Amino acid sequence: MPEKKVIPIEDRIPKLKQQRRQKANRRFIFYITVFFILILAVIYFESPLSTISKITIEGNHYTPKQKVLKESGLSTDSHYWDIEPDKVAARIEKLPTVQSVDIQKVFPSNVTIKVKEFQRIAYLDKDGSYIPILENGSLLPRLGKGQLPINAPLLIGWKQDEHLKNMAKQLSKSPQAIIHNISEIHPAPKKGGDETVMLYMNNGLKILANISNFSEKILAYPGIAEKLPKGTKGIVHLQVGAYFKPDQAQKKEGAGDEKK
């Protein structure tokens, strides 16, 4: 068997010392690096660099930016790393015009607030002026002098109560093609109860319906309307079932035509 080469201890000691020195140097560099990172972190968190430098608000049309900013609780004095997006969004969503909020943190110090508002669904005729109504029933400031309602029904004779809010919510769930063909909506309690409403359509027809199931029942209207001759006057009843009843005047005209 070949003899193993034996390295004298005198030759091994320098190599061991060198290895230990290298390990010690690496450990020292590691500790120094960690130390400086900690120092930089402390400086960063205690300096203006860690505070918000810019707050951007997007998507707001009805809600003033200052109102959104106030409800958010954020400012350029707020620390970037202290921001909790869910909590900030929840505060802003308490505003009656706001449906949802998305908070985006953009490193190193920017924050973007994306607002989704409830849409305008109708107008309330109040004391000779027009008040926009949102999907959730919230009211916006009155239109300015000379401004007129466009692309939405006009609610006439309504009180600012739960019926108004429920009507707005039902309109928001209804097809826009039908909503744009509604001219006016009036409460009609004498024709069936507190939830009964009378709609006046742009084509001259009227609709009698209930608030509670309006968005469901109104779907039957286009099918009934398209089968009626142009210029027909009467009421489409959507409270129980769905049927058309012509005006008395048209009934008499029809009877007169038959006698001829």
Image (cartoon, rainbow, N blue to C red):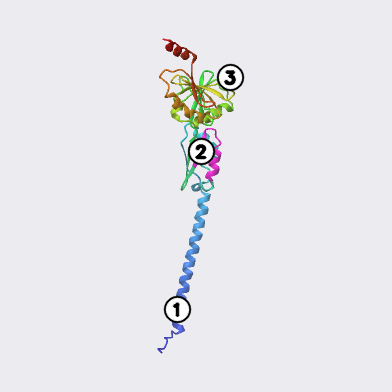
Residue 134 seen from this side? no
Q: Residue at x 49, y 62 (%)?
A: 32
Corner quadrant of residue 73: top right
**Label of residue 100 in the image:** 2
**Which residue is situated farthest in the bottom direction here?**
1
In x, y percent, where is residue 55? 48, 40
Indicate whether residue 96 is drawn in magenta: yes
**Type of residue at label 2?**
Ser
- Distance CA(mark 3)–CA(mark 2): 39 Å
- Give the left or right position of residue 5, taking residue 81 as reference: left
The foreground one among 77 and 206 is 206
Marks 3 and 2, the one that precedes in the sequence = 2
Count of number-bearing discs? 3
The percent coordinates of residue 86 (x first, y second) are 54, 44
- Numbered tag placed on residue 190 in the rendering: 3
Q: Secondary structure at mark 3?
A: helix
Which label sits in the foreground, 3 or 1? 3
The residue singled out by tag 1 in the image is 14
The three-letter code of the residue at mark 1 reads Pro
Q: Between 103 and 214, which is closer to the camera in this rendering?
A: 214
- Report, in whole angstroms, how far the alpha carbon at label 3 lies from the one at label 1: 108 Å
The crowding category of the residue bearing disc 1, from other C-alpha atoms within 10 Å (few below 14, some 14 to 19, many at least 20), is: few
